[in-house]
Amino acid sequence: MKTSNITTLDDILDKKYGKKGQPKREEWEQEFEAFRLGALLEEARTKLGMTQEQLAEKCGTNKSYISRIENNSSDIRLSTLMKIIQKGLGGHLTLKLEL
């Protein structure tokens, strides 16, 4: 039988940042989730055909703040995130906790 030469993302991350639970790996995971959140918000906004300015107006913030969130340049409070999703995008937020 042939053995697989496939390298997974987890293999790469284990090598570069350590196993899950290690401080460097946890930092990378958190930064990735923040990036992912920005990308999800941008994708939802563009699917709805909205500009950053339109979204900002609907949820009571400004275009530069929406831009910073989408580009992972700003932390976001949960209450603000919920306002963007509910008032701005007309959606709802579902959270998942993993231990």
Image (cartoon, rainbow, N blue to C red):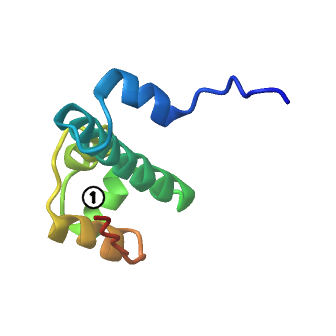
If the image is split into quadrants, where does the N terminus sit?
A: top right
Residue 74 lies, in percent from the top left, at: 17, 43
Q: Where does the image place residue 58, in percent across and percent down from the top left?
A: 30, 68
Dividing the picture into quarters, in which one does residue 68 lie?
A: top left
Count the labels in the image.
Answer: 1
Residue shown at 56% from the left, 57% from the top: 47
Three-letter amino acid code at the position of disc 1: Ala
Residue at 24%, 72% (x, y): give it. Answer: 83
Element on which disc 1 rests: helix
Q: Which of the pair 38/5 is nearer the observer?
A: 5
Q: Position of residue 23 (x, y in %)?
A: 17, 36
Instruction: Please indicate whether residue 50 sits to the left or right of residue 59 in the image.
Output: right
Task: Please name the residue shown 66% across and 27% down the image.
Answer: 6
Q: Quadrant of the C terminus?
A: bottom left
Looking at the picture, does residue 56 appear above or below residue 14?
below
- What is the crowding at mark 1: few (fewer than 14 residues within 10 Å), some, or many (at least 20)? many
Circle 1 is placed at which residue position?
56
In-image side of 22 versus 7 (left or right)? left
Foreground of the two, 16 or 29: 16
Against 40, is 14 above or below? above
> Do we see residue 8 in this rendering?
yes
Q: Quadrant of residue 45?
A: bottom left
**x, y percent for residue 41:** 40, 55
- For residue 50, say whether it is visible: no
Extreme front residue here?
A: 1
Q: Nearer the viewer, residue 66 or 37?
A: 37
